[in-house]
Each structure stands twice: as C-alpha cells, then as structure tokens.
Amino acid sequence: MVFAAITRDHGLELARIDTRTADGFSIVKDIAPGAADARPYGFLRLGSTGAAVFAATDPAHGTELWITDGTPQGTRVLADVRPGSGSSNPRDLTRSGTDLYFVADADEAGEELWTLSLDPLGLDWSTTDVGDDDGRYGELPSVRGDGSPADPT
C-alpha cells in the first residue's frame, strides 16, 4: 500500500508500508528532491495489479498524474496534462475497466473531464480486485516520520 508521509529529509513524499523500518514505512521515491514536498494525493489502486495512480508535484512537471508499482524504478509521471512546469492539478481519479477518468485543468478552458487508457501499461488485469469496487484506497491520513498526523497544507 502506498500513501503520503512526511520526513525531515524528504518532505511530504510517496511512501509505502515497510515493517523492516522503525517507522513502519519507507519513502518510495523522492519525487520533489530534498526537503521539498511532492504532496502526493488522490491514490487510486489499479485493481489487483499492484499499481496505483495518484497526483504529485515535482519541479519539472508541476502537479500531474503519476503511477507507481511501489518501487522507485516503477514510479513515474503517467500524464503531463499541462506540459512543462505548469500544473493541471488532477483530481477525482476513477477507474472503469482499463480506462482512467479524472478532472484536470489543461489550459484556459479550465477544468475538464479527461480519460486515459491504461491498456498500454501492460498491467495484468486477469485477477479480480478484493476490497472497494472502485479500487480506491479511501482517505489515507498523511503521517510524519514519528507516526504523528501531518497536515500537508
């Protein structure tokens, strides 16, 4: 499971449960290098594939759509809806079959509904999802390295 966690060295970043650490989690990837915050949010599990999509911020892309398989190598920008360092601020991520739907702001037109086919990712959709029908993790709390709640705003 991936979620947002804050540490002194990495800021608010993508993390995963890791029982081998004293904190019980580890940073998956320092998306916004150093102590800057990537502020990942909107996590959506992609069925039983082990992957998840979410929004996060980095200096090169602004706030855009990302995908992770829980490893640093498998974490990358999925769609740069507003190319460059401008932010599209994707939200309301929803999956139907192998299509991802979300709201994003690409230009002067403002927020619009977008769809993205997940077929080209080559994910294994052959097993069924256990848990929420829509694949959502639900509202996950952000936590600090000491386990206390963090307010990302």
Image (cartoon, rainbow, N blue to C red):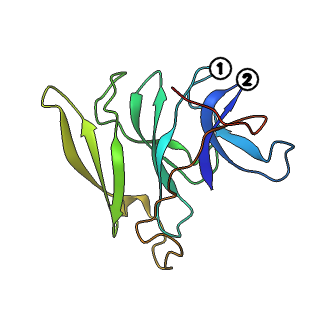
> What's the residue at 87%, 43% (across, down)?
22
Q: Are marks 2 and 1 in contact (CB under 8 Å)?
A: yes
Assess disc 1: are there few (<14), some (14-19) or many (≥20) residues with their C-alpha within 10 Å of its C-alpha: some
Of all residues, the one furthest to the bottom in this rendering is: 127
- The N terminus sits in image quarter: bottom right
Mark 1 residue element? loop
Q: Is residue 20 above or below residue 58?
A: below
Mark 2 or mark 1: whose residue is earlier in sequence: 2
Q: Quadrant of residue 122?
A: bottom left
Three-letter amino acid code of the residue under disc 1:
Ala
What is the spatial separation of the Cα atoms under label 2 and label 1, in whole angstroms?
7 Å
Q: Secondary structure at mark 2?
A: loop
Query: In which image quadrant can residue 135 be found?
Result: bottom left
Left or right of 82 on screen, residue 120: right
Q: Is residue 4 left or right of residue 58?
A: right
Q: How many marks?
A: 2
- Above or below, 47 against 38 in this view is below
Residue at label 2? Answer: 8
Q: Dot 2: few (<14), some (14–19), or many (≥20) neighbours within 10 Å?
A: few
In this image, 131 relative to 122: left or right?
right
The residue positioned 50% from the left and 55% from the top of the image is: 52
In the rendered image of this protein, does residue 104 appear above or below residue 61?
A: below
Q: Which mark is residue 35?
A: 1
Q: Amino acid at mark 2?
A: Arg
